[in-house]
């Protein structure tokens, strides 16, 4: 990138590099007492670090999702929360008490008051539904146990199915039994490890809404882990995007999606494309047009003369037929999603972008097109790599 004597922009947010290390949700209206806190937690396996200097607070009553690609450290983080792993450095606190750390006695998982729902549900095949739900209720007498199980089966919409065996249930029903069993001892926090990954797509969408409603009705604080961005954005109060063992950004789903603080978050959420953008004295210039400075979110005068990459998603752009002399680029790929097509376009300067169109609007691969920016909001931008 040619910068001449101009300042290199760091990110959409001018203080990105200096932001506080604790992911407390500042600016996202996070409220309530802290139930679970990870402070400077690192987890090593030999010489490899799965989690690095990670700090985050989980607040009472919220559903927070750890989101990221495979291998980013999100499941290890969940296991550190549960007590299934010990941190190599840093501390874990539950309701203000240290349960893991260099200067604290390690509290075993069964003594933490933490519930876990695993990917495969882990139901006991030799126990019926009622017996599975009642498994952890060792401190109640028979009458109190029956009342608690009845209440939970009502909560998860399985009343009247208590005598069935797990293998007589559908995948969604098995998931609800696993959820009821984890809620039975009234844990301080519930941890869900890829809870919808074993369900088919149609059932997955329905179940994530049902599980959210159940958790809200029960008033439970919960942390979920997923690599599915649609799932994370649709069910969570807050989303923490992880990359390479660290939290890149945490906040309300809309804020994280619309104002990604790093290029990784921008690339991971949505079908991101980047327009090479030169910031001039009075306008900004791209290969598809020239625009006012206010198109860039957080623009500041000191960036005049710099070249940056502007984030554009498929709904920000529109393609129109063009001849070779007026085209901005060519269609390289077409994705059919049912209601719409997403067209991949290679622009003449080499930028790769995507355009979303109604299913009735068809372009062919290699067809020349003009590309119009139709976004009605300011766009995030990042240093050119």
Image (tube, rainbow, N blue to C red):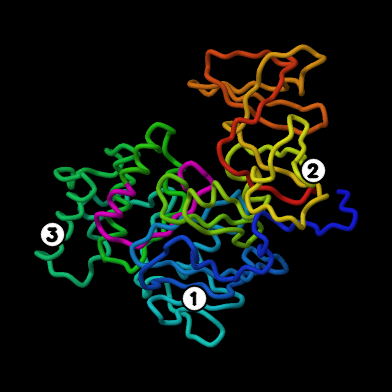
User: What residue did someone put label 1 on?
Assistant: 92
Q: Is residue 232 above or below residue 73?
A: above
Marks 2 and 3, how far apart at CA: 68 Å
Q: Earlier in the sequence, mark 1 or mark 3?
A: 1
Q: Secondary structure at mark 1?
A: strand
- Mark 2 or mark 3, whichever is nearer to me: 2
Residue shown at the point (41%, 82%) measured from the top left: 97
Residue shown at the point (84%, 57%) measured from the top left: 6
- Mark 1 or mark 3, whichever is nearer to me: 1
Query: Which numbered marker is on residue 377?
Result: none
Q: Secondary structure at mark 3?
A: helix
> Which residue is at the front of the view, 110 or 9?
9
Picture quadrant of residue 342: top right
Q: Residues within 10 Å of mark 3 (few under 14, many from 20)?
A: some
Q: How many marks?
A: 3
Q: Secondary structure at mark 2?
A: strand
Q: Residues within 10 Å of mark 1 (few under 14, many from 20)?
A: many
Q: Residues within 10 Å of mark 2 (few under 14, many from 20)?
A: many
- Please state the horizontal and vertical placement of residue 307, each as a whole percent of the image: 80, 46
> Which residue is at the front of the view, 220 or 273?
273
Picture quadrant of residue 30: bottom left
Residue shown at the point (32%, 52%) measured from the top left: 178
User: What residue did someone put label 2 on?
Assistant: 278
- Please state the horizontal and vertical placement of residue 201, each as a whole percent of the image: 44, 33
Q: Earlier in the sequence, mark 2 or mark 3?
A: 3
Query: Magenta segment range?
Result: 211-232
> Which residue is at the front of the view, 312 or 112?
312
Going by the picture, which residue comes out furthest to the left?
Answer: 143
| Residues at circles 2 and 3 in contact by the CB criterion of under 8 Å | no
Query: Which numbered marker is on residue 146?
Result: 3
Q: Is residue 118 left or right of residue 263?
A: left
Going by the picture, which residue comes out furthest to the bottom?
Answer: 103
């Amino acid at each position: 990138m040619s910068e001449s004597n101009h300042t290199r922009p760091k990110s959409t947010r001018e203080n990105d590099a200096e932001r506080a290390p604790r992911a407390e949700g500042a600016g996202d209206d996070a409220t309530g007492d802290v139930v679970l806190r990870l402070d400077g937690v690192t987890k090593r396996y030999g010489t490899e670090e799965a989690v690095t200097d990670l700090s985050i607070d989980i607040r009472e009553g919220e559903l927070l999702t750890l989101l990221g690609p495979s291998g980013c450290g999100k499941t290890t983080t969940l296991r550190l929360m549960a007590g299934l792993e010990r941190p190599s450095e840093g501390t874990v606190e539950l309701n203000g008490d240290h349960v893991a750390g260099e200067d604290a006695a390690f509290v075993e998982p069964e003594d933490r008051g933490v519930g876990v729902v695993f990917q495969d549900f882990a139901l006991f095949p030799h126990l019926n539904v009622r017996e599975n739900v009642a498994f952890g209720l060792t401190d109640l007498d028979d009458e109190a146990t029956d009342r608690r199980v009845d209440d939970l089966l009502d909560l998860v919409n399985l009343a009247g199915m208590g005598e069935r065996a797990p293998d007589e249930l559908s995948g969604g029903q098995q998931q609800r039994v696993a959820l009821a069993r984890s809620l039975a001892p009234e844990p301080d926090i519930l941890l869900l490890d890829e809870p919808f990954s074993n369900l088919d797509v149609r059932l997955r969408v329905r179940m994530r809404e049902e599980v959210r409603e159940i958790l809200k009705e029960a008033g439970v604080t919960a942390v979920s882990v997923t690599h599915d961005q649609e799932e994370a954005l649709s069910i969570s109060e807050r989303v923490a995007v992880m990359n390479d063992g660290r939290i890149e950004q945490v906040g309300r789903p809309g804020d994280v999606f619309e104002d990604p603080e790093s290029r990784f978050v921008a690339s991971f959420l949505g079908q991101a494309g980047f327009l090479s953008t030169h910031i001039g004295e009075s306008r900004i210039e791209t290969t598809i047009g020239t625009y006012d400075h206010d198109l860039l979110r957080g623009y500041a005068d000191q960036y005049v003369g710099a070249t940056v990459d502007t984030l554009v998603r498929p709904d920000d752009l529109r393609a129109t037929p063009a001849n070779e002399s007026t085209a901005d680029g060519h269609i390289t790929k077409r994705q059919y999603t049912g209601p719409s097509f997403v067209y991949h376009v290679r622009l003449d300067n080499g930028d790769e972008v995507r355009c979303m169109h109604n299913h009735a609007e068809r372009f062919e691969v290699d067809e020349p097109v003009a590309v119009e920016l139709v976004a009605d909001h300011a766009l995030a931008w990042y240093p050119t790599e």
